[in-house]
Amino acid sequence: MAARSRVLAAYAALAVADTWLAGRLPSRGVRAARAVTKTALVPTLAAAVPPRSPAVAVGLAGSWAGDVALMVDGPRAFRAGVASFAVAHGGYVAALAPHVSRDRLLASRRVRLMAGSTLASAPLMGLAAHRVDPRLGVPVTAYTLTVASMAAVTQAVGTDPATRRLLAAGGAVFLASDTVLGTRDLVLAGRPDASTRWMERVVMATYTLAQALLAVGFRRVVPAAGRFD
């Protein structure tokens, strides 16, 4: 337990370092440093909070691939990042599906709020993506719906209140992180980089927090009998 706490502290230190670097202008030195900090985030988290199911492992692997892809500039890398994170959220949904309370899913006001906001924002994000690159419109729209589905499912897990709060917070913060990312890279595309650089720090701060909340929540909700770590 003490060893895992130290590894989790290392993850927190990496998250802080990468969040700070994300707000810097992408010089050669900054890119080299982020090649270490950003690529090490998910493996370190997985070592600190080992997944208990293949579905969670898929979620972490997809997240790592998305992190790596989004370190490269250009539409092709962005499409690869979107696809990787879509796989990640699919894994997370699959891991939680057996534990979702149908009544809670249908009755939750937070789920309804997320559903309504996503139905309104997904087409707008898709249009903004299409403006950047016509090949991005449909994938970004589909991804927006996917991450919102993951966030909605986390609100409806039938488990103890503490675990439910961890997962619900992780899903909501992840959705917020992707919303900021989409706003910066798609809606505000073409603006001077310096004027939106601070948003990169918001993205990484919320993203790393969301992954940690989800990892701890998954560890608690997935039965120990199903673990493979």
Image: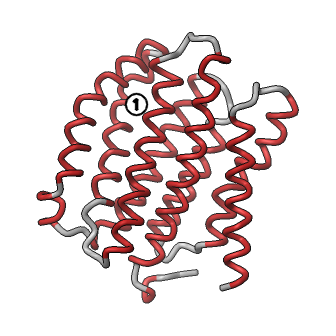
Does residue 163 lie above or below 81 as drawn?
Answer: below
Quadrant location of residue 154? bottom left
Tell me where residue 162 appears, x and y as whole percent.
37, 74
Q: Quadrant of the N terminus?
A: bottom right
> In the rendered view, does 127 fall on the left or right side of 85?
left
Q: Residues within 10 Å of mark 1 (few under 14, many from 20)?
A: many
The residue lying at 25 percent from left, 63 percent from top is 156
| Residue 73 vs residue 181, the one in the foreground | 181
Q: Residue furthest bottom?
A: 225
Tell me where residue 207 appears, x and y as whole percent.
54, 48
The residue lying at 37 percent from left, 25 percent from top is 125
Q: Residue furthest right?
A: 29
Q: Quadrant of the C terminus?
A: bottom right
| Residue 27 vs residue 126, the one in the foreground | 27
Tell me where residue 65 appears, x and y as whole percent.
60, 48
Quadrant location of residue 218? bottom left
The residue lying at 73 percent from left, 54 percent from top is 14
Q: Secondary structure at mark 1?
A: helix
Tell me where residue 129 appears, x and y as whole percent.
43, 20
Residue that badge 1 annotates: 140
Does residue 227 lie above or below 141 as drawn?
Answer: below
